[in-house]
Amino acid sequence: MLCPKCGQNYPDPGQRFCDTDGTRLVPDDLSARLNTGVFRSILPQAEKSPNIDLEATLRGNVPVDRRTVDEMRSDSRMEEMFYEVDVVSESRSTTSASKPIGRRVLPNEIPAGHVDLYERHQVPQHLNDFQPDSPASFVGKTVKGRYRVTEMIGEDNSGYAYFADDVLGDGRRVVVRILAGFEDEDEVTRSIYAEERVALSHLNHPNVAKILDSGSYSNGTEYVISDHLDGLSVADLLSIHGKFEAARAARIVKQAAYAITDVQREGVLHRDIRGANITVLPLDGLSEQVTVSNFGVAGSTPNSDNFRYQSPEVLRGKIPNVASDTYSLAVVAYEMLTGRLPFDGNSPTEIVAEHRSQNIIPVSETRRDVSKEVDGVFARAFAVEPRDRFLSARDLGEALTIAVSSKPEATKVESAPAEIAIKPMPTAVSETKPKAIETTVAKDPSFDGPSWQRRSPEPPVQDTSPWLKITAGVAAVLLVLAGLAWYFLINRQPPVEQINANGPSITVPEGNTAIADVVRPPLPRQIPQPENTNYYENLKQNLSGDLLRNFVGFKMYYPTTWKLNAAEPSATSTGRGKYMDISRLTPEGKLMEQMLVSYYPSKGTIADDRPNFPKLLKEANETLKKFIPNYQMLSAEEVSINGDWKAYEIKFQGSGPSDTGDRINVWGRRLFMPASRQGVRNGFEITMLATTYAPEVRSVDDVGVKGDLAGILYTFEPSQNF
């Protein structure tokens, strides 16, 4: 080996560096190979032309042809391309520095040619990524370049849900779910769930909410995008109306069971079957379509939202399977029929203990319209041993349908022993006691009536007294007269003609009837459209936010001269938006009359809402004080609107100076009108305002009674579909 600087030879072929100056050694024949090899055209020997200034030539100061320059390069200059040359000190002569000393350069000492903007162990987040510490900030972002998030729906143990618009799909509404229940799963299990979601995106089933897309962000957060279902879930219907009619419950369970089984055949489990994930969509007539949603959203670990619906095996830590979904559907079916859960412990351990004891209340004991065959279906569905239960959800749905369709057995009554003599009471006109008539109690096994009707009647006694017939005739006449008087009082509504200067002429009935606690809404009215009016109907297609979630339907007419403002959902989680805002203005743009329609939390009837009226009154006063100067509540009472619609009314007034210094009075009424159906969770909130600029209104008693508001309020018709 040869040192190219000092020329010292080293016989050991394994030595790599010179002992004198640390220069890397080269083979002895390197010079010969450089002069004859591939480097010759690049690095020719400079000794052949020692009188030519190479540096000046390269700077362009001395013109010379290329061949001469190439010949000036020597093999000794080659080392300068691989070694850094030490800076020559000024004290050293140029002659002594003609041969610089090279040194080795380590690769890790070479500076990088770029700048790191983040630590190497960190992954940069995209602007549209979901931020777990700020879920509300996800609104306004775009998922996969096409789904623009518009509103946050809510959150539960499975994650967060948002409404989004598909900008590439004609703006259709979808649901984006950020999944948060997979942190405890291992990588293999999470990959299985991801494959299931991909399989669901290719599934097109009429009873399964379609998954449009899925994916994950750079921070590992997974999401699912699915169709938006505009309907109420089974959990919603239970909270509104209570337990289901038996035949309807069987139809819903059967549709859901078929959907679950069909998806399971594709190798996909649900793992979170409960009422909140089964949606009922009304179709034409009385038919309904059931849709099972949120496939692939929940993991295998039970949470506080679903542990009461999970099978005991899953609660004990076993892997969910087909039987787990079937068991959960049976729990939903039992809840629909009874209004309660079969096992209602406060923890998974308590649920497992209750299931082991099998202390279940039979369905036939809570309702008379089902047979004991239904109890047999649930006894099998909730069997202690999994192998004794239904093999599939489809088997459960068919068995429940057959059991519900069977006629319940007649109620057994303890009858009197046969051949018992029954003696009637003697009549007042009879001087002698009639002979005892012996009879027996008849037992009709097909009889389905109350138990007291199963007893044999006592023998009739003929009364020959004329006074009894006279008394009966007088009583019948009095009953007829009382009925006519009642009918006249109820239907008496003397009309008052309201002629509006800028609007239609509408006949409005005056007077309020007595308040009665009704549980059924009044019959729908067919009101012909008055002249010079616009028709308005509150529809779900035009709504979003809290207005869509708390939808109440209604229709009405308002004058064409009035201004209509679009629906405006609430900007806060505690506020309530308004479905419509119509107003009548002066030519100068000053407010004359105004009506706003919103909703309020209700229980369905005036009687059920009565305990909540003080809270509604306080809330209304606090709200109206912010908008009406010198606000003053005048009265609060229950009234009747448009005949038999019952409402709780608040009357108020206020006043303040106008722009010109004139004093303006404001009068108003706020009505809280329930739907007159028990269990309906939202009622109608109607606010009417009138000012001094309305020529027909002179006090709060004229609001909605005179002026255009009178005709508008009369045409207000709540929907009959809840």
Image (cartoon, helix red, strand yellow):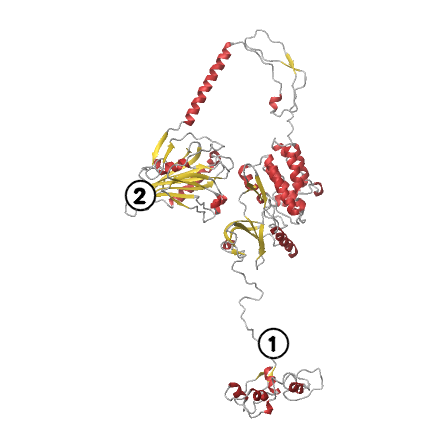
Q: Residue furthest bottom?
A: 51
Nearer the observer, 680 or 202: 202
The amino acid at mark 2 is Ile
The part of the image, by quadrant, that contains residue 356 is top right
Q: Tag 2: Cα neighbours inside 10 Å, few (<14), some, or many (≥20)?
A: some
Residue occupying image coordinates x 44% and y 22%: 484
Element under disc 1:
helix
Q: Tag 1: Cα neighbours inside 10 Å, few (<14), some, or many (≥20)?
A: few
Image quadrant in which the N terminus is located: bottom right
Residue denoted by label 1: 107
Question: Left or right of 94: which side holds 481?
Answer: left
Nearer the observer, 393 or 58: 58
Q: With respect to residue 294, does 89 lie above or below?
A: below
Element under disc 2:
strand
The amino acid at mark 1 is Pro
Nearer the observer, 392 or 23: 392
**Where does the image place residue 300, in percent across and percent down from the top left?**
64, 50
**Where does the image place residue 104, in percent across and percent down from the top left?**
61, 81
Regarding residue 499, the answer to whether it shows in the image is yes
Mark 2 vs mark 1, CA separation in Å: 86 Å
Q: With respect to residue 406, does 689 lie above or below?
A: below
Q: With respect to residue 605, does 18 lie above or below?
A: below
Residue denoted by label 2: 664
**Where does the image place residue 79, in percent across and percent down from the top left?**
61, 84
Q: Residue furthest top?
A: 431
Pointer 2 or 1: first along the chain: 1
Which of the labelled discs sits on residue 365, or is there none? Answer: none
